[in-house]
Image (cartoon, rainbow, N blue to C red):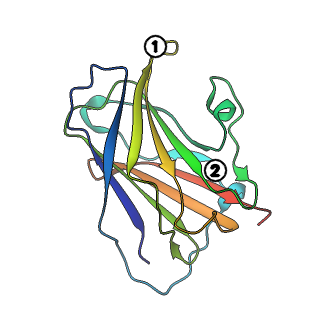
Amino acid sequence: MATDSRVLTLLVPLAALALVCALSQGAPAAAQGSVLSLPGASGPQSQIVGTPPHDNEVVEVFVYETPDQAAVGAVRPQRFRSGVERLKLDVRLKAMPRTGDQVRYELIRPDGPLPMDDGGLVTIAFLTTIGVASMDFELSPQAPSFPDGPYRLTLFMNETPVAVLNWSVGDR
């Protein structure tokens, strides 16, 4: 099954508190045609499955719709309303990624990748109040909204899988 990959290469000094970097489309992987069984909101919300490069550490990773859902201590949703047009992926790390580190994600549905039209931007900031680096990716499908159903996102850093997230849109 093909997946939609996004790649971010950090090529600028990361001393600034917030910057915007471009994402580039990665190559799809696997064969088309099969149907995956994804747990969606009934599965684990997020799982750390690997270690980021340079002894960095994933503190938290989550998908959200509204800014209040990204606040410190907020309940992180795992099911989003039908018709949602845009979501965000927040990756919080112990330290800023180093210049040249690659960060990408693969977003899949049971029938394959979801074509994305996210403009290729990610916001990177150091959240001094909680002492973590935050990378905030825009998740916007090419369709007018996310189709109802389960989703799985795999996050890679320098081609190493570091986290898997499950969520659902709508009641399914």
Query: Which marked residue is nearer to the observer: mark 2 or mark 1?
Result: 1
Q: Is 31 rendered above or below residue 170?
A: below
Expressed as whole percent of the image width and height from the top left, the position of residue 82 reads: 75, 61
Residue 44, disc: 2
Query: Does 34 sit left or right of 74 as displayed?
Result: left
* Residue type for callout 1: Thr
111, above or below 104, in the image: below
Q: Is residue 126 left or right of residue 97?
A: right
Checking the image for residue 128, the label placed there is 1
The quadrant of the rendering that contains the C terminus is bottom right
Q: Who's the residue at 51% across and 16% down the image?
A: 130
Residue in the picture at 35% in, 24% down: 95
Badge 1 marks a residue whose secondary structure is loop
Position of residue 6 in the picture relative to residue 114 (left or right) = left
Secondary element under disc 2, as helix, strand or loop, is loop
Residue placed most toward the observer, 9 or 83: 83
Residue farthest along the bottom direction in this orientation: 33
Q: Residues within 10 Å of mark 2 (few under 14, many from 20)?
A: few
Q: Residue at point 51% right, 84% down?
A: 34
Cα separation, mark 2 vs mark 1, equals 29 Å
